[in-house]
Image (tube, grey):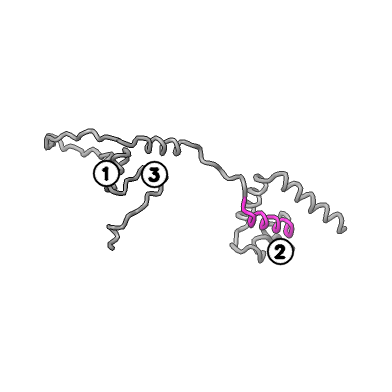
Amino acid sequence: RSPRCRRLSPRSSHIRHAWDPTKSMAQNLAEMGLADDPNKAVPVPKKKLLGMEVESDGRKQGKKIVRKPYVVNEMEYEASLPEKKSNTLSRDLIDYVRYMIQNHGENYKASTGCPREMARDEKNYYQDTPKQIKRKINVYKNFYPEEYKDFIASLKQEKMDVQ
């Protein structure tokens, strides 16, 4: 089969439910009130040359009948809903940030006399720069402020116990 002959399934569930496999793509989209060619749906006005009239062929474009307006309505409603933001971070990122803070504290970049830094740590698989690591730690602080405070308090407690 050639690629033009294969049947494609629409990605949108609204379109998929209203789709009639016996009709062409153009017929299906026209029934739903959708455009199959954006260039024809919103024509760009052509500039007229000075002194010349552009003649039309005399045909009037007929009104298109929309038989399935609910598809467009459902798609507009779905598009108007606010996007949900995820309020979680991946477990890998949380473990990475906690490991870095636990082993390096606030030492993003090596200063004089300090041999290890976060940017040169072997767990820094993606070779994040000090600024990128700092940004990830700040994201963790903003997403989980209570957990971060408890983690820092437990680190201070461990230091007190060691001394």
- How many other residues sit within 10 Å of disc 2, few (<14), some (14-19) or many (≥20)? some
> Residue, x 25% and y 42% (percent of image)?
40
Question: Magenta span: helix, strand or loop, mainly?
Answer: helix
Q: Position of residue 92 (x, y in %)?
A: 64, 57
Above or below for 50 versus 2: above
Alpha carbon of mark 2 to alpha carbon of mark 3: how far?
59 Å
Q: Residue at x 30, y 36 (%)?
A: 67
On the question of residue 137 being in view, the answer is yes
Q: Residues within 10 Å of mark 3 (few under 14, many from 20)?
A: few
Measuring from the top left, give residue 149's x and y in whole percent. Answer: 75, 46
| Amino acid tagged 2 | Arg
Tag shown at residue 17: 3
Q: Quadrant of the N terminus?
A: bottom left
User: Which residue occupies the foreground of this view, 110 or 156?
Assistant: 156
Magenta stretch containing residue 129, yes or no? no
Q: Is residue 41 left or right of residue 119?
A: left
What's under tag 1, amino acid-wise?
Gln
Image position, residue 77 (x, y; %): 44, 35
Magenta extent: 89-104
Which disc number belongs to residue 116?
2
Q: Which residue is mark 1?
A: 27
